[in-house]
Amino acid sequence: MRWRAILLFGAPGSGKGTQGKVLGTIPGFCHISCGDVFRGMDLRTPVGQAFLKYSGAGNLVPDDVTVDLWRQHMDHLVTLGKFKPEIDHLVLDGIPRNDTQAKLLKKDLKVEALFHLVCHDRSKLEERLKRRALRDNRLDDASDKVIHDRLATYENETKPVLEFYGEKVVHEVDAEQFPYEVARDILSQIGSPKEKIGSQNLTAAAL
């Protein structure tokens, strides 16, 4: 059984985490961010030890290890009853991060929609990232170089993922709007019979 999923994509600072939290408050939606996966992992397991091996050495965690961590996390949520596959839709942000992860997750997910939060004004993204870094007291993350590198990495990784899922699944949303306007646009497309996203109970939840 593949789990029904809605993916939130967007450059750092586009607000996908905010929108994920909003959707996660609606019955029938279960929001999971990549940060949730890492925070919820069991370091005693083989996959947890593999994560430590790479992250402890300052290296990028391989895609297969990341996906295995995600599967371990989701199995835990199902066991605890926090995610009910028979009635819930997953709302994911931060995973899959690239087309390799998307391919690995193909057997796990039935992706019904991917919402790409687009901000054409790069200066707005940079301003949001600096403000967030200062608010969270992460001064290193506020540097222009770090922000530039993060945005460049996103641009390089995201295009192949959008192409992997295709035009029928990908929906662009203007991320320069106020957060409630972005949420409105996402929900209007989830609940649209024309788009045929989700089931009747998902449509009812969106309304």
Image (cartoon, rainbow, N blue to C red):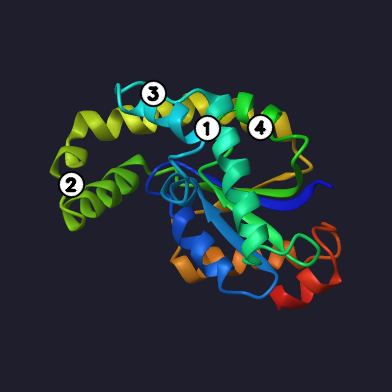
Q: Nearer the viewer, residue 152 or 46?
A: 46
User: Earlier along the polypeptide chain: callout 2 or callout 1?
Assistant: 1
Mark 2 near mark 3, Cβ–Cβ under 8 Å? no
The percent position of residue 157, horizontal first and vertical second, equals 51, 26
Quarter of the figure with residue 190: bottom right
Report the disc number at residue 138.
2
Callout 2: SS: loop
The residue to which callout 1 is attached is 47
Report the disc number at residue 102.
4
Mark 2 near mark 1, Cβ–Cβ under 8 Å? no
Callout 3: SS: helix
- Sort mark 4 into few (<14), some (14-19) or many (20+) by Cα contacts within 10 Å: many
Mark 3 near mark 4, Cβ–Cβ under 8 Å? no
Which mark lies nearer to you, 3 or 4?
A: 3
Callout 4: SS: helix
28 is higher (above) or lower (below) than 168: below
User: Earlier along the polypeptide chain: callout 1 or callout 4?
Assistant: 1
Quarter of the figure with residue 158: top right
Callout 1: SS: helix
What is the distance, in whole Å, between disc 2 and disc 3 at their CAs?
22 Å
User: Earlier along the polypeptide chain: callout 3 or callout 4?
Assistant: 3
What is the distance, in whole Å, between disc 3 and disc 4 at their CAs?
21 Å
The percent position of residue 15, horizontal first and vertical second, equals 44, 55
Which mark lies nearer to you, 2 or 1?
A: 1
The residue to which callout 3 is attached is 54
Which mark lies nearer to you, 3 or 1?
A: 1
Residue type at tag 1: Val
User: Earlier along the polypeptide chain: callout 3 or callout 1?
Assistant: 1
